[in-house]
Image (cartoon, rainbow, N blue to C red):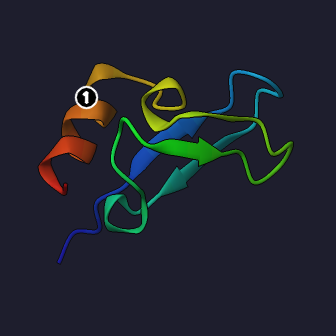
Amino acid sequence: MVETFVRLLCPECGKNWEENPTDLTGHREQFSCPNCHATRRLVEFVRTEHDLETLKQFQ
């Protein structure tokens, strides 16, 4: 079984990390960086279009 993940990048502090898309909120919902706690829509943290498409598949 292949594990799916979404790559995230905080626009405030630059933290890079990966999350399982089933653990995330909707891409238009508010999301907070675990490092600096900046809060924006989740879509603003998603690194690439491919990551966004992966996230949308699990919502």
Query: In the displayed structure, would residue 51 be above or below residue 3?
Result: above
Query: In the displayed structure, would residue 54 be above or below residue 22?
Result: above
Q: Residue at x 34, y 58 (%)?
A: 21
- The image quarter containing residue 9 is top right
Taking 14 as reference, is 19 left or right? left
Q: Secondary structure at mark 1?
A: helix
Q: Residue at x 69, y 21 (%)?
A: 11
The residue tagged 1 is 50
Q: Estimate the x, y position of residue 2 in percent, counting from the top left.
A: 21, 69
Q: Nearer the viewer, residue 13 or 30?
A: 30
Q: Residue at x 39, y 47 (%)?
A: 6
Taking 40 as reference, is 12 left or right? right
Q: Estimate the x, y position of residue 18 in percent, counting from the top left.
A: 53, 52
Taking 36 as reference, is 58 left or right? left
Q: Estimate the x, y position of residue 43 in percent, counting from the top left.
A: 42, 29
**For mark 1, does the 10 Å Cα neighbourhood hold few (<14), some (14 to 19), or many (20 or more) residues?**
few
Residue type indicated by callout 1: His
Total tally of numbered discs in the picture: 1
Residue that sits furthest to the front in the current view: 29
- The image quarter containing residue 12 is top right
Q: Quadrant of the C terminus?
A: bottom left
Q: Nearer the viewer, residue 42 or 54?
A: 42
Q: Quadrant of the N terminus?
A: bottom left
